[in-house]
Structures are given as C-alpha cells and as structure tokens.
Image: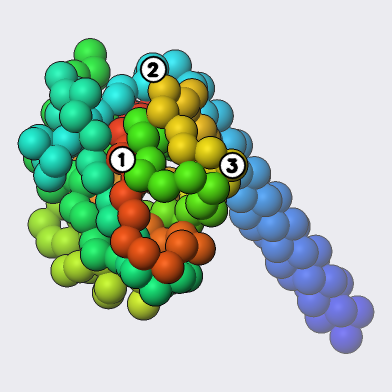
Amino acid sequence: MAKTAINNTEEYIEDSEQDIRGTDSDNLKTLSEQSDDIKTDTEEIKLHGATGSRWLGSTAGDSPGLLGSITPWVLVSNSTPNTYGDVKELFSGVEVYAYPFTPTKIHPHKLLVVTTSKNEILWKLQFANSGWDGSNHTYANMADAVAAGFYSTAMINFETKKTNTVSVDFQGGRMNIGSKVWCRCLNDDNTESTISIMIGIHAYLI
C-alpha cells in the first residue's frame, strides 16, 4: 500500500510539473503574440504618420479622384432642412496615390472647403466607402453602407460665405485601396445650396 501511495504521489508530481510547463508555455505564447501585435500596431502608426498627405480633386466634378486636379467636387443639399441631398461619388477605386511603396489602405482625414453658395449655414457632410476586399465591394452603394453603420460625418459651421479656407481634420475611417468613396450633405437652409470640397488622405503600407 505504501508503494502504491508513493507511485501515486510521483505521478501527481509529474502531472503537476507538466501542467506548470504547459501553463508557462501558453503564457509565453500569449505574451509573444501580444508583443507582436503591439509591434505591428506601432509600425503601422509610424508608417501612417510618415507617409505624407496626398490631396485629390475631381475628374471634371466626378470620380475618380486625381492627384493633379484642383477641381473640387460640388455637393448639393436638399431643399428641405436637415435632409441629405444627392450622393456624389468621390473615389471610384482606381485612384493613384504615387507613393514610393504600394499602400494597402488609405485614410481620408482632411477636408478643404473651396467655396459655399450661401451665407450663415451649418453643414453636415456624410462619407461612406464600399469596403473593397480585394475581390468584391462589400457595399454596392452609399445607402447600403449607411444602413450597416459604415459611415463617418463631418460638421462645418460658417457665419459667412467662405472661400480660401484652411483644411479641417475629420475622421474618414481607414479603408482598403480600391474602395469607392461617396459623400452627401445637408444643412439648415430651406433651399438647395452647394458646398465645394477637396479631400486629403494618408496611406498605410500594412
């Protein structure tokens, strides 16, 4: 009986040591994975900040966005206050950003208001993208993207009609290269009015 008890104790100790080794191994693996994630996130932030901005204008008022264009997109509000006007496609997905590397993602983050048609208007601009995955567009149109909550907004308040304004920051959201970008606007005026814009982006390598 004493021999059996000793054998059982030895087996228990051996099993415990294996559990400890397994736990340590799992913990080390988890820590290593977390470290890799932090390293990747850090590199992504560094690359994002170092890539430089690219400003795009329209192709004769429509998509695709062009680096060499200073022709803005013109957005038209609805004649009903606080109601979005027609959707304008800004990027068609074939844009060229001319970086010294091949980016995989971009981040629209700057908005330049070139001019507005009315004085003393509060504007809301809504942006959405198609979520290109390399093979297909997740959203066929802006309505589908908005319905899925896949959109961003920017607010601009003008006391007077503005031209030659400085650019403003907005959170356009990171998106895959090849995605379409749409925009529409509303304001607090009861007649159709226009706002002309250009877009600035950053790129991501990873």
> In which quarter of the view is residue 129 placed?
bottom left
Q: Is residue 164 above or below residue 113?
A: above
* Residue beneath disc 3: 159
Q: Amino acid at mark 3?
A: Glu
Q: Which residue is mark 2?
A: 52
Q: Type of residue at label 1?
A: Ser
Q: Secondary structure at mark 3?
A: loop
Evaluate whether residue 99 shows in this view. yes
Q: Residue furthest bottom?
A: 1
The percent position of residue 71, horizontal first and vertical second, equals 19, 29
- Label 1, label 2: how far apart the Cα atoms are: 24 Å
Picture coordinates of residue 153 (x, y %)? 47, 55
Query: Residue drawn 21% across and 23% down?
Result: 70
Whether residue 142 is situated above or below residue 63 in the rendered picture: below
Label 1: state its secondary structure: strand
Residue in the image at 35% along x and 44% along y: 117
Residue assigned mark 1:
196
Q: Pick whichever, 26 or 129, lies toward us.
A: 129
